Amino acid sequence: MKRLLLLTVFLITACEPLEKPMGIIEGPFLIRDGVYFKQSTNKHVTGEIRTFHENGQLHESAHFRDGIKTGLNEFFSDSGLLSVSVMYKNGLKEGIEERYNSDGALRWVITNAKDKRNGPFVYYKNSGGIYHKTEGHYLNDVRHGSWTSFYPDGKKGSVSNYLNGKSNGVFETYKTDGQVVTSWECEKGKPANIPPINDTPPWEWDEQDRIFHQLSLDGFHDLCASGYPNSID
């Protein structure tokens, strides 16, 4: 009998989850200095809070521990499609963040650390149903290192370089056959050289060449000064 009792206790213990899943918490809530409290008990919220669109579709799912966002936070459109997915730790963005277009297609992916963009970044631009990809890196919310944009077939379209958010190094744009269309260099946000003009005569430029050559020499000076915006949407 003792042996059976011990076995029963072991089975119950082994089947019990290591950490119980946090349940959905219903409001209303009080918010003090960014910390969530359940109004009826005045205790910190630990669990999942959900909000909804007027049509009943889920709008946001946020997880809290001791009143502070910790874990997965998701936003949805009123049609039910995921629009934002971001991880939190102690109230700060930490880990992977994903944003989606209104059609549900992935727009970009970034790595966060202590509520700042810190790490690899991949951006997908929808142009007439064709997606162009850009890959780069952020350091403390600003562009840092090499950034590369690609044509839909995976070939390089442009390369740019940054140092702590400022244009620094070679910037080049390419035709689909790999030929360099424009090339210039910046140093800490200032032009380091005058970009050469492609030897191909204008009457032989294709549409891609015309787009790239719309940049004037003054434009290159502006690009070195500002690069591309550090913000993303």
Image (tube, rainbow, N blue to C red):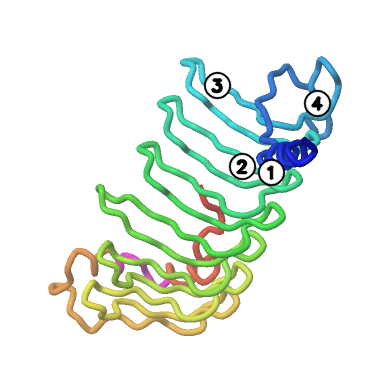
Q: Residue furthest left?
A: 203
For label 1, the residue is 14
Few, some or many residues within 10 Å of mark 1 (<14, 14–19, 20+): few
Quick check: 124 left or right of 4?
A: left
Measured Cα–Cα span from mark 2 to mark 4? 19 Å
Q: Nearer the viewer, mark 3 or mark 2?
A: 2
Write the residue at 43% across / 67% down.
Answer: 219
* Precedes in sequence: disc 1 or disc 3: 1
Closer to the camera in the image, 101 or 205: 101
Measured Cα–Cα span from mark 1 to mark 3? 38 Å
Dot label at residue 72: 2
At mark 1, the secondary structure is helix
Few, some or many residues within 10 Å of mark 4 (<14, 14–19, 20+): many
At mark 4, the secondary structure is strand
At mark 3, the secondary structure is strand
Magenta region: which residues?
212-217
Residue 154 x, y percent position in the rendering: 29, 68
For label 4, the residue is 37
For label 3, the residue is 52
Q: Amino acid at mark 3?
A: Phe
User: Do we see residue 69 in this rendering?
Assistant: no
- Number of numbered discs present? 4
Quick check: 133 left or right of 190?
A: left
Write the residue at 77% across / 29% down.
Answer: 45
